[in-house]
Amino acid sequence: MSQIFDFLFGQYAEYSTLDISLEIIAVLFGITSVFFAWFNKIWVYPTGIVSTSIYVYLLLKWSLLGDMMINAYYFIMSIYGWYVWTRKVDETHTTPISRTNSKEKIIELMIFVGTLIFVYIVYKTFDKWNDWTAYVDTFTTAVFFVGMWLMARRKIENWIFWIIGDIISIPLYFYKGFTFTSFQYLIFTIMAIFGYLAWKKSLNKPLVIA
């Protein structure tokens, strides 16, 4: 039992109590945020802002630039998404769940390719392009950037990008030594699947303002 515990959490012996506590808090708020997204509730954004703010601090401290940029982008898109989700399309309805159109698919591709190039430049600039995880980080960052933009636009396809990115992130964060965050992405994967199914039932139904 001790060996299993050391295997999963041994890396935390070198971390400060504050950093461990902050990671756990960020994980809890992150899971709560996805829970609200699953049920299409606006609280996805304030809870997400708390989680991403903590991760920006921790990941910058740990020199994980790709991951830090993901969370900084999440923070910005959370503010944008908060606006879009509460924007009225008429006097009684807010922005509904919908599918992406042709124009939005082009924007998806532009965000994905643009992110790949941007992250590559950042990693090369800071001499971080020296491990296989940099390649995976670059790809997952692009996937998550598209997913967050789609969620802010209330597009059902956001869940597909989350599922892909989450599955890749489970072993990636475990390898990096962040077991709590790895478990978080495992939970995220399960929740994203149910979130997709829940949103599919509500597809194209306008949200009535109470």
Image (cartoon, rainbow, N blue to C red):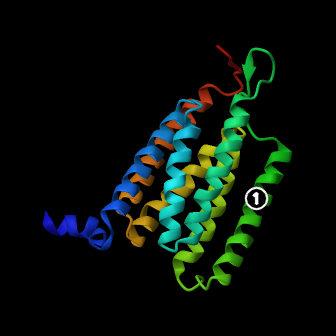
**Foreground residue among 62 and 41:** 62
Determine the residue positioned at 64% across, 44% down.
78
Whole-percent x, y for residue 58 in the image: 47, 64
Determine the residue positioned at 66% across, 83% down.
124
Compared with 183, 114 (above or below) is below
Left or right, 164 with reference to 118: left
Determine the residue positioned at 60% across, 26% down.
201
Compared with 161, 114 (above or below) is below
Left or right, 94 with reference to 189: right
Determine the residue positioned at 73% across, 37% down.
99
Whole-percent x, y for residue 186 in the image: 41, 52
Q: Can I make out residue 157 in this image?
A: no
Residue occupying the far left of the picture: 1
Quarter of the N terminus within the rendering: bottom left
The secondary element bearing badge 1 is classed as: helix
Q: Can I make out residue 106 in this image?
A: yes
Amino acid under label 1?
A: Ile
For residue 135, what is the image quadrant?
Answer: bottom right
